[in-house]
Image (cartoon, rainbow, N blue to C red):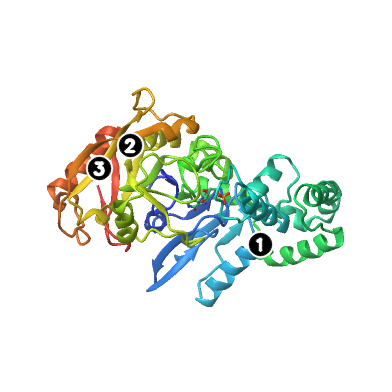
């Protein structure tokens, strides 16, 4: 196995967990490189369902090293819950490492996220309210706490003297929220220091160098999806990190040169949670049918996901900006009983008839766009037991080959069900 990055190629929830779980078998080091506990990854293993938010799901395999990288933001209370849940299941956590450079989500970050969402009249993002945006905001403003600060009284003292007066003014005057005393925050940091202590990887440079030198296999685990990327997604309806393949180079401790492949996971249709444009969204019974058959409800929030036909316009864009070398297409079995499957190959502007085959990055015009579809015949049989590409029904293969043609990117993996075995590697 070469060193691979697995990313979401749509708006998240593409089934990345299953693909990373599959690839983690052959990896020595698995690195989660961006996002925080806004992600929800479900893995079925040892006859049990595990829901991950922050910890790489590779932890379920014995003997793997799983690093929560510098590009992530960590909500300590969620980390603790995840750790406790895994301990209860007797999962060995000795391979779990946390980068000292990861950023801490403090209580004010979740409070501000919640306040902003609950009080937004215009411009609501529909966030997971896990403090993601406010934490990354402070990271970029250089007023965030990093994991390593928890073990440096000097850093903590100096930083809090800068951070707290600013934060308290903002919390009180802008949001009307509770303020924090230094003593209170120091006590909290003391608790966090104890929580993270067994996992903080102060020797991460040596560790990463050793894995590289020994030619060990590295898997970079992305969260969310390209269309939620803060640079390339449907801004401002995005998350605050870089789910594109390039994020692995800044959020892990390795530069881009160790990466050999970027696999973009996409569903055979599209879903989205939260607000923001979605040109192929179906608000009719076909959308409801996809949601029901595909069990499209959020892992982190339980929200019903918005559903629509596969959008090759955004996917072509995701192939480019995500840096994809191949695609893992999931949930194609959801269409087993569909007579017709639609594929959006262009957008039409209802104002002047202009056709877009490239993704228009000005999302404020998306409300004027309608999808241009081509229609594909369904296959009408259960494909969940198929393991070889050539055994797929002709219409399913035709659909997949058409996708490869439109996207100019090969499909390397086809997933036909939630289990590890329900996978076709091309
Ligand atoms: P935030 O990441 O909580 O700030 O939310 C920003 C946007 O990203 C919202 O539309 C969320 O619904 C969406 N989002 C964040 N994480 C995920 C995810 O793991 N899957 C799907 N959507 C997500």
Place of residue 146 in the rendered image (x, y in percent of width and height, measured from the top left): 71, 51
Q: Earlier in the sequence, mark 1 or mark 2?
A: 1
Place of residue 154 in the rendered image (x, y in percent of width and height, measured from the top left): 85, 52
Q: Which residue is mark 2?
A: 312
Q: CA distance from mark 3 to mark 2?
A: 11 Å
* Residue toward you, 421 or 200: 421
Mark 3, secondary structure of its residue: strand
> Where on the picture, by quarter, is residue 47?
bottom left
> Where on the picture, by quarter, is residue 358?
top left
Q: Which mark is residue 342?
A: 3
Question: Looking at the picture, does residue 243 appear above or below residue 115?
Answer: above
Mark 2, secondary structure of its residue: helix
Q: CA distance from mark 1 to mark 2?
A: 38 Å
Q: Which mark is residue 76?
A: 1
For residue 194, side relative to residue 309 (left or right): right
Query: Which residue is located at x 84 percent, y 46 percent?
Result: 162
């Amino acid at each position: 196995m070469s060193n691979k990055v697995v990313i979401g190629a749509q708006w998240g929830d593409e089934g990345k967990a299953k693909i990373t779980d599959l690839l983690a078998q052959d990896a020595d080091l698995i690195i989660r490189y961006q996002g925080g506990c806004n992600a929800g990854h479900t893995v079925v293993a040892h006859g049990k369902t595990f829901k991950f938010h922050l910890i790489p799901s590779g932890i379920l395999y014995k003997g793997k090293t799983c690093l929560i990288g510098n590009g992530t933001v960590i909500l300590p209370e969620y980390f603790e819950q995840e750790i406790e849940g895994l301990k209860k299941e007797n999962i060995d956590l000795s391979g779990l490492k946390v980068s000292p450079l990861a950023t801490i989500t403090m209580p004010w970050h979740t409070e501000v996220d919640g306040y902003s969402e609950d009080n937004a009249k215009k411009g609501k993002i529909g966030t997971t309210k896990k403090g993601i945006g406010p934490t990354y905001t402070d990271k970029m403003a250089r007023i965030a706490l990093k994991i390593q600060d928890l073990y440096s009284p000097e850093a903590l003292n100096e930083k809090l003297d800068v951070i707290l007066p600013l934060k308290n003014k903002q919390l009180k005057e802008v949001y009307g929220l509770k303020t924090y005393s230094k003593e209170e925050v120091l006590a909290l940091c003391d608790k966090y220091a104890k929580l993270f202590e067994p996992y903080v990887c102060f020797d991460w440079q040596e560790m990463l160098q050793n894995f590289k030198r020994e030619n060990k296999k590295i898997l970079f685990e992305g969260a969310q999806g390209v269309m939620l990327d803060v640079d390339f997604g449907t801004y401002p309806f995005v998350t605050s990190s870089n789910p594109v393949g390039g994020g692995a180079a800044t959020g892990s401790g390795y530069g881009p040169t160790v990466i050999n492949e970027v696999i973009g996971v996409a569903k055979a249709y599209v879903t989205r949670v939260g607000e923001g444009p979605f040109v192929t969204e179906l608000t009719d019974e076909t959308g409801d049918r996809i949601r029901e058959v595909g069990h499209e409800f959020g892992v982190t929030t339980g929200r019903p996901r918005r559903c629509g036909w596969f959008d090759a316009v955004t996917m072509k864009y995701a192939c480019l900006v995500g840096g994809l070398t191949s695609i893992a297409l999931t949930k194609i079995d959801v269409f087993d009983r569909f007579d017709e499957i639609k594929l959006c190959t262009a957008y039409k502007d209802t104002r002047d008839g202009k056709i877009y085959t490239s993704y228009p990055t000005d999302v404020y015009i998306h409300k004027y766009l309608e999808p241009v579809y081509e229609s594909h015949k369904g296959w009408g049989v259960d494909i969940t037991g198929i393991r070889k590409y050539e055994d797929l029904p002709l219409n399913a293969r035709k659909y997949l080959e058409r996708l490869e043609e439109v996207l100019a990117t090969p499909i390397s993996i086809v997933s036909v069900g939630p289990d590890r075995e329900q996978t076709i590697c091309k």
